[in-house]
Image (cartoon, rainbow, N blue to C red):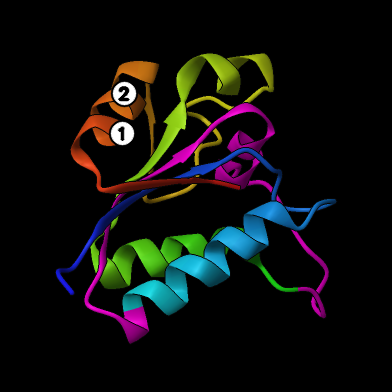
Amino acid sequence: MNPLSYTLVIMGPAYGAQSAYCAYQFAQILLSSTNHSIDNIFFYADGVYNANCYTDPANDEFDLIKAWQNLAKQYSLKLTVCVAAAQRRGISVDNLAEHFELTGLGELSEAIANSDRVLQF
């Protein structure tokens, strides 16, 4: 089987729902256990909360923002955040976590066009 390229669209917040954590788990397993690749991880709607550097989970909670950052660093991933959705939710360059970048929906369109598979969480 030929390796596939994926784009992940994350629409759930870092905390209060499972979708972003499930997306992280999927990405981690896909990258560590297969020869498939992830071209882009796009955070949209409430998913932009995953990019807020001021999120401060309790000591006994999993730090999903830090986990995204570590994954991006380890695998040279693009963590792109919809700028319009981010602005509506108070996310800006001032509170954008490291390894995340603000982009437009054009970035998502291009990623979808160039990927073999697109998964929405």
Label 1 with label 2: CB-CB less than 8 Å: yes
64, 91: nearer the viewer: 64
Please say if 37 is above or below 31. above
Task: Give the farthest residue toward the bottom.
Answer: 33
Figure check: 38 above or below 41: below
Q: Residue furthest left?
A: 2
Q: CA distance from mark 1 to mark 2?
A: 5 Å
To which residue does mark 1 refer?
A: 112
User: Which image quarter is the N terminus in?
Assistant: bottom left
- Please give the range of residues in magenta: 32-61
User: Was residue 47 drawn as part of the magenta stretch in this picture?
Assistant: yes
Side of 3 relative to 53 (left or right): left
Q: Is 26 above or below relative to 87?
A: below
Q: Quadrant of residue 74?
A: bottom left
Q: Is residue 73 magenta?
A: no
Query: In the image, what residue occupies the spot 47% across and 25% down?
Result: 82
Q: Give residue 36's position: percent from left, percent from top.
A: 25, 69
Q: Amino acid at mark 2?
A: Ser
- Marks counted in the figure total 2
Residue at 49% x, 61% y is 68
Judge the density around disc 1: few (<14), some (14-19), many (≥20) Cα neighbours within 10 Å: some
The location of residue 96, given as percent across then percent down, is: 50, 38
Residue wearing tag 2? 109
Question: Residue 73, percent across and down?
Answer: 31, 66
- Amino acid at the residue labelled 1: Ile
Find numbered disc 1 in the image and state the secondary structure of the residue it sits on.
helix
